[in-house]
Image (cartoon, rainbow, N blue to C red):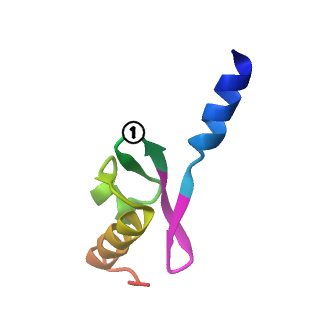
Amino acid sequence: MQENSLNRARALKPIVIAVGGEPQGVVVPNENGFRFLAVRLPAFAIDGQQFDTVEKARIAAMAAVRAHGGPAA
């Protein structure tokens, strides 16, 4: 039983999304894709949103940072 929990924890490992070298949040894989969890103020505009891919989450984070007046890349 515990082994299954450990395997699931590894499979659901968060992926850091950074913009301009600054972490903005993480995406956590789930059954519908990836859920974004913000860790910085500019990224809170997309906090909790669901994305099909990590790349789409990264693009959305870049747009959120740009809209907040930060660097776009």
The number of numbered badges drawn on the structure is: 1
Q: Is residue 8 magenta?
A: no
Tell me the quarter of the image containing the C terminus. bottom left
**Residue 11 point in image, percent of width and height:** 60, 42
Tell me the quarter of the image containing the N terminus. top right
Relative vertical location of residue 57 with respect to residue 71 in this rendering, above or below: above
Q: Residue furthest top?
A: 1
Relative vertical location of residue 5 with respect to residue 72 in this rendering, above or below: above
Residue drawn where x is 54% and y is 72% of the image? 22
Q: Which amino acid does label 1 sit on?
A: Glu
Q: Is residue 22 magenta?
A: yes
For mark 1, what is the residue?
Answer: 31
**Residue 42 point in image, percent of width and height:** 36, 65
Type of secondary structure dominating the magenta stretch: strand
* Viewer-proximal residue among 16 and 56: 56
Residue drawn where x is 60% and y is 46% of the image? 13
Highlighted magenta segment, given as a residue range: 16-27
